[in-house]
């Protein structure tokens, strides 16, 4: 199967894609230079606007779209910018909690090569600043549920839950997080995968770059380019090695989709539930990915956005399987005739 030809929608943002948000009835993409576009469920453009700088995070709240854009947090409705507020340092993560917009920011010190100060900001839906809390640690993961949970880097590390600090099994900085169906998983710089309940789930040999959820467990992307799939009980299901992993997502009956980059070309790999490679394709550098129940999307360095739709993908995959079986049968018949 030609993975690119099997895409349901291909669009061009006009600049490197830095964020992607997919729902069943719409798609929003943000760019490295601040472009923000929205398409409907049929792939038609609904609106386009220009924000201050690179779009890092996208948050939907009913009809409004809130993004972190460079040093700003910006609120958009139907393509019109309603308000935009500057933060201190780069604007990073977003959540909606207790009727307020929560954003994080961080200041990077080039001389020390590390993040020196961060802050948690609360805004009303009208853009009014409610409060700001400053701290030394940079939050690398933000989750809003019954509690507001932030996973922290150096120096304190651990979790911040509703403003209260909690230790984790590893005191190594948290690099990424995943909100699953029953638990929050956290990936650490020392290779530990822990839970927000304080349990050590697994220990990998390299730093955890990202985590994604499967129907039967989770996949950890390691710093060395290795994928490790495990059950919730930490039993290894499969592994796969390759170049640097830039993004990963799961969907379409537990298929795992992975973007890789080897400093010269990109690649998308699709694997089944036992880790076998189903299909792959060379691409521009994959930067971001997202999914809904019936759609999976990737955004690339060259500005392209590719969306795959479940039914079309499965139909193409089945058609390819039938054609492959037909070719194999014809080859087998030819070999039998040659033997005779």
Image: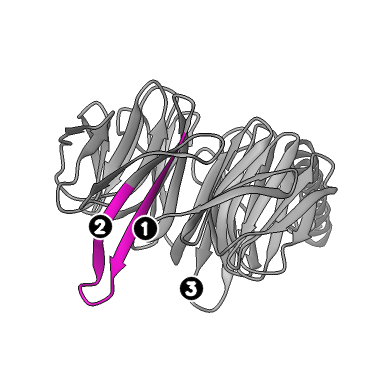
Residue at (22% x, 77% y) in the render: 111
Tell me: 22 left or right of 317: left
Q: Residue placed at 54% from the left, 79% from the top? A: 264
Element at label 1: loop
Q: Are marks 1 and 2 in contact (CB under 8 Å)?
A: yes
| Residue 99 at x, y percent in the picture | 49, 26
Quadrant housing residue 114? bottom left
Residue identifier under label 2:
117
Front: mark 3 or 2: 2
Q: Which residue is mark 3?
A: 262
Q: With respect to residue 211, does 53 lie above or below?
A: below
For the stretch drawn in magenta, what is the main secondary structure?
A: strand
Q: Position of residue 324 (x, y in %)?
A: 77, 51
Please report whichever mark, 1 or 2, sits nearer to the chain's N-terminal start.
1
Q: Which residue is mark 1?
A: 88
| Corner quadrant of residue 200 | top left
The reply to whether dot 3 and dot 2 touch (C-beta < 8 Å) is no
């Amino acid at each position: 199967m030609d993975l690119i030809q099997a895409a349901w929608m291909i669009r061009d943002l006009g600049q490197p894609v830095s964020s992607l948000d997919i729902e069943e009835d719409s798609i929003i993409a943000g760019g490295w230079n601040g472009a923000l576009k929205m398409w409907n469920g049929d792939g038609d453009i609904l609106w386009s606007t220009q924000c201050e700088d690179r779009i890092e995070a996208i948050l939907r709240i009913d009809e409004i779209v809130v993004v972190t854009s460079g040093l700003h947090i910006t609120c958009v409705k139907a393509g019109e910018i309603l308000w935009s507020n500057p933060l201190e340092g780069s604007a990073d993560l977003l959540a909606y909690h207790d009727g307020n917009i929560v954003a994080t920011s961080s200041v990077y010190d080039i001389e020390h090569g590390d993040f020196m100060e961060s802050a948690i900001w609360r805004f009303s839906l009208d853009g009014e600043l409610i409060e700001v809390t400053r701290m030394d640690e940079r939050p690398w993961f933000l989750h809003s549920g019954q509690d507001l949970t932030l996973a922290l880097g150096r120096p304190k590390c651990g979790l911040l839950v509703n403003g209260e600090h909690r230790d984790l099994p590893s005191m190594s900085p948290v690099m990424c997080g995943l909100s699953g169906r029953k638990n929050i998983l956290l990936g650490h710089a020392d290779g530990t995968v822990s839970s927000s309940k304080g349990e050590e789930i697994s220990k990998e040999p390299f730093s955890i770059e990202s985590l994604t959820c499967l129907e039967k467990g989770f996949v950890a992307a390691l710093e060395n380019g290795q994928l490790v799939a495990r059950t919730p009980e930490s039993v290894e299901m499969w592994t796969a090695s390759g170049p640097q992993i830039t993004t990963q997502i799961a969907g379409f009956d537990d298929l795992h989709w992975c973007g890789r980059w080897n400093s010269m070309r990109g690649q998308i790999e699709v694997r089944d539930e036992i880790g076998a490679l189903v299909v792959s394709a060379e691409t521009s550098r994959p930067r971001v990915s997202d999914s809904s129940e019936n759609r999976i999307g990737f955004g690339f360095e060259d500005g392209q956005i590719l969306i795959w739709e479940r039914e079309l993908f499965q139909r193409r995959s089945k058609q390819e399987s039938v054609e492959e079986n037909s070719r194999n049968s014809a080859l087998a018949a030819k070999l039998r005739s040659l033997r005779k």
